[in-house]
Image (cartoon, helix red, strand yellow):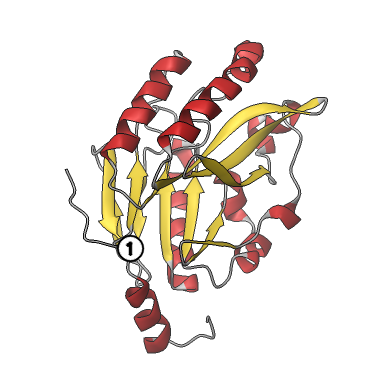
Amino acid sequence: MTISKRGEQHLCSLLFETTSDYNTNLQTLLSLIKQCPKDSFIVASEVCLTGFDYENFDAVLAFASLATEALLEASKEKTLFLTIIEKEGDGVVNRLKVFQNNQIIYQRAKAKLFRFGGEHHYFHEGDTSDVMMFQTQGIKVGVLVCFELRFKELWIALEGCDLIVIPAWWGKARAEHFITLTKALAILNQCYVLYSDSKNEECTQESGIITPQGEVSSNGNTACLCRSYSKKEIALMRRYMDVGIG
């Protein structure tokens, strides 16, 4: 168990396998959230509760409201980042949701669909203008969902963030791309990057935390990896290597 100092904030990266049983996945996630200390920023992998279970899409969509209610309750004194597949109008979106203190403080549809994997056949694409920095608990936060990590205009939209969070379902064949891009994002923006890919066999199984200096802590076989967040570390790096990021 992690014992927090008063006012200390934490970053927590989760790594677990998504099974065919949605409720089992939800219980795994809720159990890991409980392990995270108070005032944690927690990321789970993209669609971690259901996977891209296109063959059972009706069941996936029916599960969204149940999962959302459970995560609202679990987010007391914590901030949780993940995506959930749900209905929007006459279509379906892969929606990023940020839960905090029993509320959803930010949400948007995934703005760059992975067409190579056929996502555009199942989802409506979100608006890239919704990819923006927002501030919570004194931290400037941005989120990129999986394939969005490859688009430089979205990096520019998040310039100046203290923390960039990346929930992903990234193919194992392109693992080096994922590792390189997440680290480069932290170094270029001189910020923390908190990322989580799935532990499923087809994914990279790479989850972890990168500091503003580009130091990487990977989950390895750890389901819940936590470290302290330091605003001072960001300020020191931006002062030491001044590239115009305020």
The kind of residue tagged 1 is Tyr
Q: Is residue 10 visible?
A: yes
Residue 149, given in percent of the width and then of the height, sits at 57, 53
Residue 229, given in percent of the width and then of the height, sits at 33, 63
Residue 186, given in percent of the width and then of the height, sits at 44, 66
Q: Is residue 219 visible?
A: no
Q: Is residue 3 left or right of residue 76?
A: left
From the image, tell me which residue sits under label 1: 229
Q: Is residue 21 above or below residue 218?
A: above
Judge by depth and name the residue closer to the eye, 23 or 172.
Answer: 23
How packed mark 1 is, by other alpha carbons closer than 10 Å (few <14, some 14-19, many 20 or more), is many
Q: Is residue 170 above or below residue 70?
A: below
Judge by depth and name the residue closer to the eye, 34 or 216.
Answer: 34
Q: Residue at x 65, y 60 (%)?
A: 132
Q: Label 1: state its secondary structure.
A: loop
Q: Quadrant of residue 57?
A: top right
